[in-house]
Image: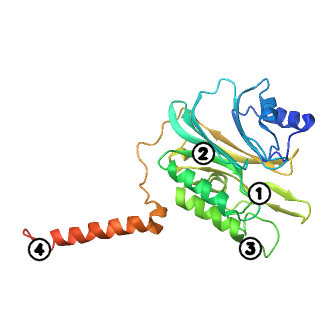
Amino acid sequence: WNAGGIHTPIKRSKILWALHRKRVDMALLQETHLSTPEHLKLQTWWVGHVYENPSLGRKAGVAILIRKGLDLQVSTQYQDKQGRYILLRGHLGGDELVLGSIYAPNVVDQQFQRGLCRLLHSLEGLPMLLGGDFNAVMDPQEDRSGAGAGWGPGGKTLFTLCEAHNLLDVWRILHPGDRDYTRLSRAHGTFSRIDYLLVSPVLFSRIRSSVIGPIMISDHAWVDLVFDVRAPFPSSCLWRFLRDLFADTVFHGYLRQQWMEYCTHNAVHENDP
């Protein structure tokens, strides 16, 4: 949920009460606009742990709130220096996975993109559940109101990110063809769906539902996901070739050398049927 800044006690209380009424076990927040000491104020009656990446001034800032009693054991925490993302590696209900809250810039930022992609690449192979405001639409025809809206560089980057790391847009898969939006732009009088919950395919079987809520308190709607921690992971899933290797010149040389060796050793087939 992009909270749109919660440094005032009144708005912070409204956000926490709204999450509590929904009986949220885990909340991925963006644009908190809070420093580290201010983030600790979010650890209230129902919040057991606050994992945060502070904002620079009143800009950005992300956090992950964990309800008291949730069986989450965090082993490693990753974050950038701009308060744009925080990722947690740990065990939820006994299974290892990666959780993340992401707030992407509203302009193309190569440093942010490279940093996030390198981090996700280093965690390749672990199931991921990432949520955030990506400031981009995946499908300009279905995810934005108004005619003539283009994809834009942000949308291409988001699409490439999902393709490279095999991430699924949960809400869209569960609501094919539907139109719903997560942000209101009062300046342009338009709506768009720029807030996403992205998961690895191995986690999708555990998802029971995903809903876009009303736009309230903030100028963004929350996106929720009902996740069954107790459901077992599928025994197998499809293997996927890493897209990054297509652009890796070292890998190209290794593959070429291995192919030449194979051709040399198999030039003559002694047992040709």
Which numbered disc, 1 or 4, marks the residue closer to the eye? 4
Residues at circles 1 and 4 in contact by the CB criterion of under 8 Å: no
Find disc 3 in the rendering and name its residue. Answer: 150
The mark that comes first in sequence, 1 or 4, is 1
Amino acid at dot 3:
Gly
Find disc 4 in the rendering and name its residue. Answer: 268
Residues at circles 3 and 1 in contact by the CB criterion of under 8 Å: no
The correct choice, above or below, for 85 with respect to 38 in the image is: below
Which numbered disc, 3 or 1, marks the residue closer to the eye? 3
Amino acid at dot 4:
Val
Give the secondary structure at mark 3.
loop
The mark that comes first in sequence, 3 or 1, is 3
Find disc 1 in the rendering and name its residue. Answer: 180
Amino acid at dot 2:
Leu
Find disc 2 in the rendering and name its residue. Answer: 129
Horizontal side of 263 relative to 158 (left or right) equals: left
